[in-house]
Amino acid sequence: MTADIAGCKAALAHLDLDDNPATVRQKSRDFFWYSPPLKARMDHLTADFVVAPKSEAEVVAALAAAYAHDVPVTTRGAGTGNYGQAMPLSGGMILHTKAMTAVKEIGPGRVRVEAGAIIADVDRETRAQSGQELRLHPSTYHTASIGGFIAGGSGGVGSIRWGGLRDAGNILKLRLVTMEAEPRVIELTGDAIHKASHAYGVNGIITEVEMPLAPAYEWIDLLVGFDAWEDANRYASDMAHQDGLLLKELATVAAPAPHAYFLRHKPFIPEGAHVAIATVADHALDAALAVTARHKAARVLFRSDRDWTEGLPPGFELAWNHTTLRALRVDPKITYLQVLYAGDPVAKLSEMQRLFGDEVPGHAEWVRFNGAVVAMGLPLVRYTTEARLEEIMALHEAHGCPIFNPHRYTLEEGGMKQSDPVQLAFKRETDPKGLLNPGKMIAWDDPDYDFDKGGFYLFPGMTAVE
Ligand SMILES: Cc1cc2nc3c(=O)[nH]c(=O)nc-3n(C[C@H](O)[C@H](O)[C@H](O)COP(=O)(O)OP(=O)(O)OC[C@H]3O[C@@H](n4cnc5c(N)ncnc54)[C@H](O)[C@@H]3O)c2cc1C
């Protein structure tokens, strides 16, 4: 199957189409460079052209032309994903959703919006019109699209209260377009949503989403300092288990990272402090401070209601992968992991700190997972070699801390290390030629792939380095 790029471009000349190599290359990249192994393998990749449809009808036209001309299509929201999910492995078209941003309907507990809408813009609209806000958002709130969050993200700010995107009720409806001779528009609700959520756009282009809303509050950030990592995590665990306390974000970050990397907040953070970041609803502030006061080792370093000044980022922009981003800005050699601290997270976090010391400074995001409080880690790693990175991950797993590998671009290797039969079956229906985001679903290319053998899956169709 050879892609007829020129034929496809000619068929789509009536749409917003860009084939300037510099901007196409820019739109072919995401935040894959957080990962040295991904950077080494993906830096050269670029698409042939970018199409930015203005409506679902234009998405249908773009996919019909791509299908007719055998052109691969990789969808791009804002390109803030960290695993190269939005990067075209074998060229073709970038379908950029930037012009599909309409908020279509707001009602009690729900909003219907086009997939390319930036998450903060959706919230601005729902807050203004109805006093409600999205339950969950990534820490890339100000830049990421809602469709990209659903197709490429997992959870984030709000997950301490609401769990993750995979939890029932956190996505209400998806509308998507298939990659066929005559593309169809399909609506997914209930469990069917997971056919296409967190599927990197390999089995349909999401054009519209319906998301649940919660009452909007003024949120207050607290930074609470501790001399001992274990005390910070004990405090976070206690806060997380307070059923009456309305929290939106809860994270712990081990020293030296808060003082060394949270540059704008540095004046508030003493050297050597381990920090808990808690975001609480304004009505819950007194209760949160009361719980904090029960922890003799806790010192409130910063309160946004008291200490905020122009230019300070919100607390969530110190958390999730913003912790990594802030560390990377100071030390470009840093990378990160994604870890589940199952069982007793406070004990596990201490155990990992003893095992790795300053090579892996701790960072935990406290969230609800299958109805229970857990700590999902995004610890920093002072990167040396790929072999050592693999060893660090293997040691985590050996100590009962499962890794969700952020140094892989495929759905399977970054997730449960097994194929998802539901997403695969759906892809057979929606993308019979396998043109949507090729190479991101191993099960499509190699159904017998052995996930236990380790190593790196290198998509055979990946454009070679020139
Ligand atoms: C500093 C930083 C912090 C982050 N924090 C978080 C966090 O807290 N939680 C979290 O989950 N992630 C986080 N991320 C990852 C990422 O920002 C989010 O997942 C974000 O929601 C992705 O949105 P996007 O619009 O940038 O998607 P993109 O990167 O453009 O796309 C993500 C994936 O979805 C596909 N896709 C995009 N739009 C569509 C569509 N309409 N239909 C079908 N497929 C589509 C793409 O092909 C790609 O595979 C973070 C990243 C950075 C750099």
Image: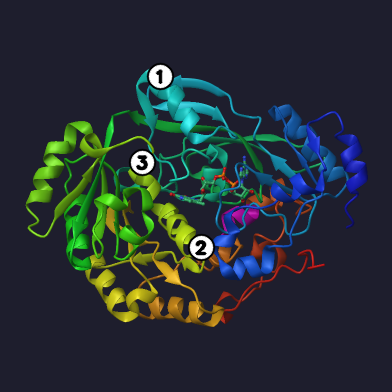
Position in image of residue 288 (x %, y %): 15, 43
The residue pinned by badge 1 equals: 128
Query: Compared with residue 164, is residue 189 higher up or lower down, i.e. above or below?
Result: above
Name the N-terminal-most of marks 3 and 1.
1
Could you tell me which quadrant the C terminus lies in?
A: bottom right
Image disc number at residue 415: 2
Name the N-terminal-most of marks 2 and 1.
1
Badge 3: residue crowd in 10 Å (few <14, some 14–19, many ≥20): few
In the image: residue 356, left or right of residue 418: left
Q: Quadrant of residue 123?
A: top left
Does residue 391 show up magenta in the picture? no
| Amino acid type at image mark 1 | Ala
Q: Quadrant of residue 179?
A: top right
Secondary element type, mark 2: loop
Q: CA distance from mark 2 to mark 1?
A: 37 Å
Q: CA distance from mark 3 to mark 1?
A: 24 Å
In the image: residue 158, left or right of residue 241: right
The residue pinned by badge 3 equals: 312
| Amino acid type at image mark 2 | Gly
| Residue at position x 63%, y 65% in the image | 39
Badge 2: residue crowd in 10 Å (few <14, some 14–19, many ≥20): some
Position in image of residue 135 (x %, y %): 37, 37
| Residue at position x 88%, y 42% in the image | 8
Image disc number at residue 266: none
Q: CA distance from mark 2 to mark 3?
A: 34 Å
Range drawn in magenta: 419-425
| Residue at position x 61%, y 47% in the image | 79
Query: Compared with residue 276, is residue 311 higher up or lower down, i.e. above or below?
Result: above
